[in-house]
Image (spheres, rainbow, N blue to C red):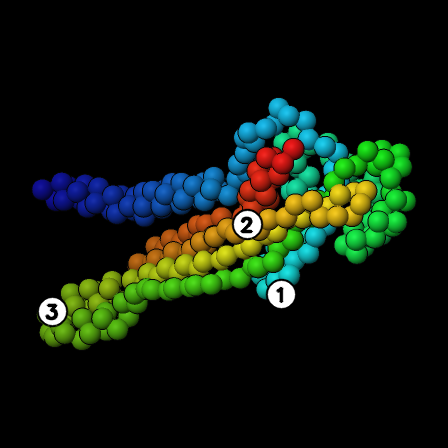
Amino acid sequence: MKMLSMRLLVVIMLVLLAIPSALAAGKQTAASKKANAAADEAMYRPVEYPNKDKKGPVVVVIPGEIKSSNATFTQKVTVNNIADFGELELGNDNYTVLERSDLGSMMQELQLAANMGDKDGLKKFRKGKFATTKWLIRFDVLKAEPVAAAKQGFDGGAIGSIISGLGTGKTWRGSHAAGTAVGSIETGESAGIWIVGMRYKVIDAETSEQVASAYKEGKMEMGTKHGSMLGFSSSSEAGVTLDTLVQRLVQDCVLDLDGKK
């Protein structure tokens, strides 16, 4: 009987030792799934442009402006990022895109001439491979700001203290254990909404006249969740990143331009 009790005790101890590892493995799998789902949401999504088979004109994407002073946004997104997205999407839509890097130091002069409507200033660039350029295109971020935020959570510390204080005598240990368990519970979540607005401009590379312009807005939610109990914790973040939102706005703009070929 004593030997049986010892074996049973050993089995129980082994099971108790295995529980944390099993819980950790399950938590790791759940965390991996959440992380992969968030990554999938932020991945590049190609757009099928309706007029992709129709050859677009020769264009140069010139860096635009970011008129938002929000530090979080400007740390994540630059005018060159946006111009790179523009070149990528216009190329995907069968436009002939001339590389900005080929202009080198002349890019700033081209930007200035285009923005000032300087027809004579643009003439100096109409040579070589740039002689056939029809449009200069720029993408400007006119708005980038968080517009709403909310937080909620639960901290079991206060309730745990109350439960611990209820026990006396023989019931003290049970009440103390229950109070400790409840007191270790902590959960919370937060969500924030961003709105980003983008305008594109199409400028005639020969006359400096504005050919087309439109404004697009996109909304993004960023959220976090966390929780802990008896030493086990979990946390997750979800939402499209700011640069991904900007890229999708560029895609919306190019969809608009797709109908103007």
Q: Position of residue 17 (x, y in %)?
A: 30, 47
| 163 and 172: which is toward the camera | 163
Q: CA distance from mark 2 to mark 3?
A: 65 Å
Q: Name the residue rendered at 60%, 48% in the picture.
A: 214
- Nearest to viewer (mark 3 / mark 1): 1
Marks 2, 3: nearer the viewer = 2
**Measured from the top left, where is residue 19 in percent x and y?**
28, 46
Q: Amino acid at mark 3?
A: Thr
Residue farthest to the top?
A: 53
Above-or-below relation of 95 to 28: above
- Mark number displayed over residue 171: 3
Q: Does 180 sit left or right of 88 as displayed?
A: left
Q: Which is nearer the N-term, disc 3 or disc 1?
A: 1
Give me the C-alpha separation between circle 1 and circle 2: 19 Å
What residue is rendered at 79% in x and 42% in y? 205
Say if mark 2 contacts mark 3, CB within 8 Å. Answer: no
Q: What residue is pinned by disc 2?
A: 216
Amino acid type at mark 2: Lys
The quarter of the picture where residue 170 lies is: bottom left
Tag 1 residue: 69
